Amino acid sequence: MEYEAVIGLEVHAQILTDSKMFCGCSADYANAAPNTHVCPVCLGLPGALPVMNQRAIEMIAMAGLALNCTINHDTFFDRKNYFYVDLPSSYQRSQYDHPISSNGWLEIETSAGTQRIGITRAHMEEDTGKLTHAGDLSLVDYNRSGVPLMEVVSEPDIRTPEEAKLYCTKMRQLLVWIGVSSGNLEEGAMRFDVNVSVRPKGSTKFGTKIEIKNLNSIRSVERALIYEIERQTKLVAGGRSLQQETRGWDEDKGVTLSQRSKELAHDYRYFPDPDLPPLTLTAEWTAERRAELPELPDLRRQRFQAAYGLSVQDAALLTSERAVADYFEAAVKAAEGHPAKSVGNWVTGELFRLLNDSGETIRAVAARLQPSFIGELLGLLKAGTINGPTAKLVFEESFRSGSTPTAIVDAKGLRQISDTSAVRQFAQQAVDANPKVVGDYRAGKIQAIKFLVGQVMKASKGQANPQLAEQALHEVLDR
């Protein structure tokens, strides 16, 4: 019998605000000493009263709109009760029945085509503290406690680990794009919980749901699902029954491990938080949030294809990040008269290579390597001032120094040698120095001339006009 997986995902993303969700403590705790960004509210001390972070509410509504959700008119916060050391008040301020946004969707591009994944809700809660385990000891840092955290809950519409990976990647791209989350996986600013079950293919009945908690990378999501689907399938196919439970992922061993029986909603004893008033989100308020959204990545990708004649692959690369898309579009505007495709090639080729080598972001280098430099470089190529190999050297120097391409060409004497007599001298030298290759050429191996062109370019330090070099070689060889 063939089995299929039914997968739902919970994406937890910290919201980019200056202060925490219900107090004035700084939310920028990444490099702070443990337990230094805390106060009576985020430590859950008796009598401490919370005050909502208005900007966090606005930003989660923006995220909901970007995810095609409905912004609910009436919303309030609940207390989600459970007892764990990283939760100082023994309850978490969260949302359940009345979230800020609900009933949305996110589309992913799979090998089988576009697939729409339903979004049950996108709601706000407060983050917990962070535990560090050291031998028999567990240390807790409450700097993270109370940081605004958005939870996006999907419908069980995902069927494969690959689809889960694509969904998480698209979700991260979108939330970073609109500026509501850093998406920094290394710092825990985005984490994932996976709910997965297996059932006979074609069945509409759900199997026993297993939750895998606190996955901190998209790769871990995919690997954990591959393992867990195989584990469940073997058990079910062998006639074994599964118990609903929560499991953890051991990255080093590549296995999931049982942690506890899975809690149900009633186990958390949700009830409205008496310290926080209900919110009424009007149509006018929602329209203001929608106006804050930038052009979203899917729409921008489609526009790049239509307006600039880019391929699907190039448009996808150039809209992988908002900063990349902004840089490309600024470069196209500055390079008026040059094809957008040529501009895109320099961005996705040489610029991406240099960013990868240096570890810098395009946002960090944009002030140094100005978008207009690409148009200037294309102009030098079109005029024959420099050739292709020299252009790459000039671009790299611009990337590192911030100097304009023209200034680099002039300072280093890199202008292309287009003087016919000078190029012919290099051609004669190449012919004289390589009698065997010359013999091959005259014996009918026409491609041998490519080697000789390379020798001319080497002798001229890459500055000879390649077309003139080949023409001069033909003249010398056929003389």
Image (cartoon, grey):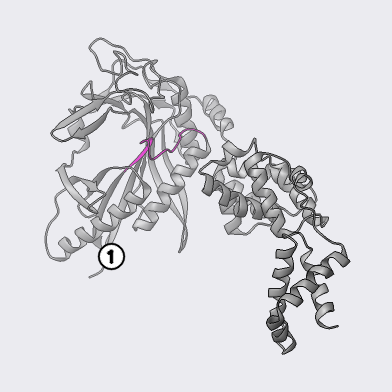
Residue at (70, 69) in percent of width and height: 454
Q: Please provide percent x and percent y for residue 161.
A: 34, 56
The image quarter containing residue 103 is top left
The image quarter containing residue 24 is top left
Q: Is residue 82 visible?
A: no
Q: Helix, strand or loop at disc 1?
A: loop
Front residue (pair 215, 137): 137
Q: Is residue 452 visible?
A: yes
Q: Please provide percent x and percent y for residue 96.
A: 31, 32
Q: Is residue 181 magenta?
A: yes
Q: Please provide percent x and percent y for residue 455.
A: 71, 69
Q: Residue furthest top?
A: 47
The image quarter containing residue 241 is bottom left
Q: Is residue 369 left or right of residue 95?
A: right
Q: Quadrant of the C terminus?
A: bottom right
**Which residue lies under the disc numbered 1?**
201
Front residue (pair 220, 46): 220
Q: Residues within 10 Å of mark 1 (few under 14, many from 20)?
A: few
Query: What type is the residue that disc 1 sits on?
Result: Lys
Q: Main secondary structure of the magenta part?
A: loop
Q: Please provide percent x and percent y for residue 182.
A: 46, 35
Region rendered in magenta:
179-192
Residue at (70, 49) in percent of width and height: 394
Q: Is residue 216 left or right of residue 418?
A: left
- Vertical position of residue 469 compared to residue 96: above or below: below
